Structure formats: structure tokens, C-alpha cells
Image (cartoon, helix red, strand yellow):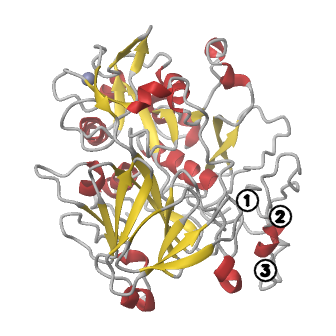
Amino acid sequence: MRFQVSQVMDAIEQRLTTDVAGAQAVVDLGEIVRNVELDRGRSANLVRVGMVIDALGRYLVDDGALLYGVAERSLLSEPALTSKERMVLGRWTDQGLIEVTPTIGDRVVEVADLTGLPLIVTRPYPDLVKRFGWLADGDGRVLQLTFRAGVAALRPMDDPTGEPAGAPVTGSGPAVGRAKVPRPEPATAEPAESAPETESESEPESEPVRSLPLPVEVFGARGAARIARTRVSWRRFRRAEPSHPGLLLREWRCEGFECPAFGEQRRIGQPVPRMRGDVPVCPRHDEPVVAVGPRLPAYPVSIVVDDLPRRRLVVRGGQPVRIGRAVGDGAGDGSGDGAGDGAGDAGAEGDQPEELVSVARWLHEAAAARVSLVHLQLAAADDGLVVTDVSENGSIIWMRDRPDDPGTTRPLHGDTCTLGEWDSVELYTGIELVRGDRRVAAALGRDGLGSVLMDAPTAVHKQV
Ligand SMILES: [Zn+2]
């Protein structure tokens, strides 16, 4: 049997975080795990979390999309889960990869409100609309999980047309020519919707590329147009404004025993406290948290390979990250799917070695010959992400003034540079680092997106 539960769980684990700097959407895990509609399987199944992660990845066109999952404590002892699944949930909790709270109440909606993250739902929350008006304003902050043709998908809730710009891509990869998408309304389009670059003539069997079920703001090109290929877009990827921005500017401390959310041993960036009236409290322990200083700057970074974000990491103040071809070195990023590199993201033991993130698995021979074992160092400063080239062959900085700017380049070799908000840095043609909150738009190529469920014997990954 190909189905390897532990592999799937490891793959899911890589895509969970409660670090608000890295997360891209928030969801009530119980609502998902117990949702029989998703696969018509047993009454509770942890694999369903992977379906949501895959749906988020397709929606954002991001193979490294990170999910902020909140679980009511009762889920950890849910009898319909296998003992293995309960154990995995406990591990995720202890590592701070998911948030566990005594009662779920309004917590997921609150997290979305306090952080500006999109909220993934399977049902409306009518009783909370009065408090959180954005739940019903149709502005795209609420993403409805739907299940069609064997695939879970996300779509903005309350879209009057029923065919939002972000119509989900069905199947595991790009469904070229299968779905009609209305031409973008000029009023809703971002500047310079120069999609024509994607109109390749190399696929005579396909319909024109404009019928790709891609979001209108995602564009780019592969192949011949490589040199001007990457555009920066942000419309669907931007967050809403946090309702209490001050909460995210402070580092909080909870005195609860080994608190995975606000304890001293936490290795990743912090979540957002729960508000009890005006008092910030720990969502796990329900006790007030105290501010222990300003929160250090943190920047999400996407590793973009051939125009598709493949992995997302967070670079935090005081914790530089090295990027290169090297594998191992405590980061353990040598495995095929990255399942072993949790140490880097989720917290290494003891003296934390400087994180090393490997790009080895995306390098073809020519690229491997040019990319150094340690190629770049990334550091978070108050004024931006600082890139230092330590490679043998150098890197390229792509400088852009605005989202649709094709950019100009300059070399970076043995030197340091602070990336502008729309800039990116290229290790080798097609292997690029971009600010994860200033997305480089991706074009779906033939490779398509991966799946955390690739070994699961379900229809989830099946092409339709
Ligand atoms: Zn706590």
C-alpha cells in the first residue's frame, strides 16, 4: 500500500505554523478534521488538514503555503482519530505548530481579525458578523472550502458571480484550457495586467492561455520570456489590516508551564494573544501574557523556482538564515520532500545552529555547478531584509519600483544589500528569493503544484 500515514503527516507538519509572520490563512482544525463531506471517510481524519493545505496552495499558487491551525483542546482526545493521529496532534501542539485552546469560541475569527490573515471556513459565522463586519463584506477575507470533483478548493465567500477571479484550480496541476474565466474587469485589475506574455503558441492543443483558471493578478511567463518572466503582484496575497496592530509589535510571555505559544523555549515567531476584554491572554492557558519587549523584525521569504514558490520560511531578527546547495549541517534538508528539515523551522535543540536552508533538490546540473554550498545569508533588520552574498559565482539582485515593474538587475558578489520591498535576489536563473509578503507572481507551468497528500489513496490528487 502506497499510503504512508507518517509521510503525509510529516508533509503536513512542514506546512503548519502559528508564527503570524509566516502564516497565510487561519482555520479551525476541528471543523476540518471532523468534516466528513471532504472525503466521505471516517468521522474524524487528520489527513483532511492536508486537503486544506493543498487547497490553500492552489489558491495562492504557492507550493509552500503555510496554515495557522487552531484546535479546541477536545480535538486532541477525539476518539474517532487513531492513536497515531492523536499523538501527531500532541506533537504539533508541543512544537507550537498549531494552537490549542480550551474552547474554540470565536478564536479563529479573532486570529484573522487581529492579524489580517484570511479565514478559511466551511460554514458561515452569522453570530459573529456584528462584531466582525468583514465576515460578510465579501472582500475576500473569508475563503470558503468547497469540495468538488474530488478536490478541495477555496473561493472567496459571498462572491455574487460565483466565479471569483481566484477560481480554484482543480486537480493537482494546472488545468490548461479546462475552465473559462471571465476577462478581468478593469476596475478590479491591478496595474498593468500584462497577461499576454503567458500566451504561448507552443501548445496548439490548448485554448488560449487567458482561459487558464488563474487569478487575474497572477501572471508571468516561462521559457522564451524568461528574462522578463517574473512580475510582482500582491492583490490576492496581501493581508488585511490587523485590528490591533500594537499586539503584533510586542513580544509576549506566558508563565504557563512550557507554554508552546508564548513560552521562552519557543523557537519560531509568536502567534497573537487572545483578547479577554482589553487584556491579552494566552490562548492555551487563558492567563494574561506580559509584554517583554518589542517584537523583532521578521520577514517571510519564498524560495521561488521556475516562477513557483516552493518553500516559505521566516527570517527573524537575531536569527540569520543561510541558503545554498548544502544539505545536512543540522538542518537536515536533504530529503526529497523536505520532511526532515523541521529542525530548521520548528526549533533545533539547545544552541540553535544558524539555520541552513537547502535548495539542492531544485537544482539541475548546470545550476548545481553555479550555486555554492552556502550562497546567501539572510538577516532581518528594521528597514528590511538584508542579503549577503557569500557565494563563489555571485547572485543577481532584481530591483523593482512597483509591483508590475519588470525590474532591472545588478550583480551582488561578496557584498551586502537591503532588498527593497519589490526586489528579489536570484541565485541562478530561475532560482529566486522574494519577500513572502510581496509576492512574485507565479505562472503555472507544466510542473504544477505538488501535494502534501501525494501518497494518500484518495482522489484528492487526481487530475480531473
Ligand atoms: Zn501559555
Q: Amino acid at mark 2?
A: Ser
Left of 458 or right of it: where is 90? left
Tag 2 near tag 3, CB within 8 Å: no
Q: Taking 121 as reference, is 244 left or right?
A: left
* Amino acid type at mark 3: Ser
- Pointer 1 and pointer 3: residues touching (CB < 8 Å)? no
Residue at the disc numbered 1: 214
Which residue position holds label 3?
Answer: 200
Report the front residue among 39 and 389.
Answer: 389
Amino acid type of disc 1? Answer: Leu
Q: What label sits on residue 211 in the rendered view?
A: 2
Q: Residues within 10 Å of mark 3 (few under 14, many from 20)?
A: some
**Mark 1 packing: few (<14 Cα in 10 Å), some, or many (20+)?**
many
Instruction: Name above or below for residue 204 compared with residue 122.
Output: below
Residue 79 visible in the current orientation: no
Q: Position of residue 453 (x, y in %)?
A: 46, 56
Asked whether, in this view, residue 415 is left or right of residue 302, the answer is left
Could you tell me how far apart the alpha carbons at marks 1 and 3 are, in whole angstroms? 15 Å
Residue 402 visible from this viewpoint: yes
Q: Residue 458: percent from the left, percent from the top?
A: 51, 54
> Which quarter of the image is occupied by the N terminus?
bottom left
Q: Is residue 165 above or below residue 454?
A: above
Picture quarter containing residue 195? bottom right
Which-is-in-front pick, marks 2 and 3?
Answer: 3
Question: Of marks 1 and 3, which one's residue comes earlier in the chain?
Answer: 3
